[in-house]
Image (tube, coloured by chain):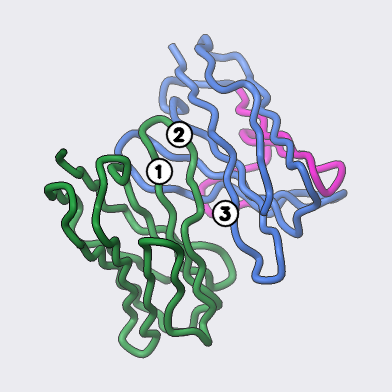
Chain colours: A blue, B green
Amino acid sequence: SAVISQKPSRDICQRGTSLTIQCQVDSQVTMMFWYRQQPGQSLTLIATANQGSEATYESGFVIDKFPISRPNLTFSTLTVSNMSPEDSSIYLCSGLSGVWETQYFGPGTRLLVL
Amino acid sequence: KQEVTQIPAALSVPEGENLVLNCSFTDSAIYNLQWFRQDPGKGLTSLLLIQSSQREQTSGRLNASLDKSSGRSTLYIAASQPGDSATYLCAVRKGQFYFGTGTSLTVIP
């Protein structure tokens, strides 16, 4: 299994500012993902974080708004740029580990934008 | 596009009852299916993963089955406990992961 931590666990930010969320895995994972979960909703995939190259973004998400880095196999960051109240959400990172590529999640980052 | 549906959206049962949660998906050509639980304000905890070639997986009081041809999976929880109260999500993998909207379970002491 993989244990994933995220920092910060929560934050309150002002409109127009940016926040970088860190995701650290205790072991190497093959793939890492970033999701958004809005209140009462299921998970929406933002992007796949690729090691050493640009992330692969899903429809509706762009690099200028959500730049992602993954410098190695155990660490990734997601930046939420030029925030607006609509960005208030839980942001979750995950990684695939093991022979069967089980998906493990971090505890999430609760973001409130005022 | 793969669509994943979970029924019921919410379920309330007395402690000790056995229960079944349902997950259905529209495209049967999947790589695997995974069940998670999510406690309020927390991340997702992996419960069981079923490969596309498998029919079921068991862990303790949990048993998950997969019927690819009909696009269905069930999560069976035996002898439910108040600590089982959480939202249960299924996710189907075909390329990326597609998540259902979850079943919110409350087990009443």
Res B42 label: 2
Q: Position of residue A57 (x, y in %)?
A: 63, 51
Viewer-proximal residue among B41 and A42: B41
Say which residue label 3 marks. Answer: A58
Count the numbered circles shown.
Answer: 3
Q: Chain of mark 1?
A: B
- Separation of disc 1 and disc 2 at Cα? 6 Å
How crowded is the residue under tag 1: few (<14 C-alpha within 10 Å), some, or many (20+)?
some
The secondary structure type at the circle numbered 3 is loop
Q: Is residue B28 above or below residue A38?
A: below
How crowded is the residue under tag 3: few (<14 C-alpha within 10 Å), some, or many (20+)?
few
Query: Which residues make up the magenta segment?
Result: A57-81
How crowded is the residue under tag 2: few (<14 C-alpha within 10 Å), some, or many (20+)?
some
Callouts 1 and 2 close, C-beta under 8 Å: yes
Q: Are marks 1 and 2 on the same chain?
A: yes
Residue A15 among those drawn in magenta: no
Please name the residue shown 29% across and 61% down the image. Answer: B77
Give the amino acid type for the residue marked by disc 1 in the picture: Gln
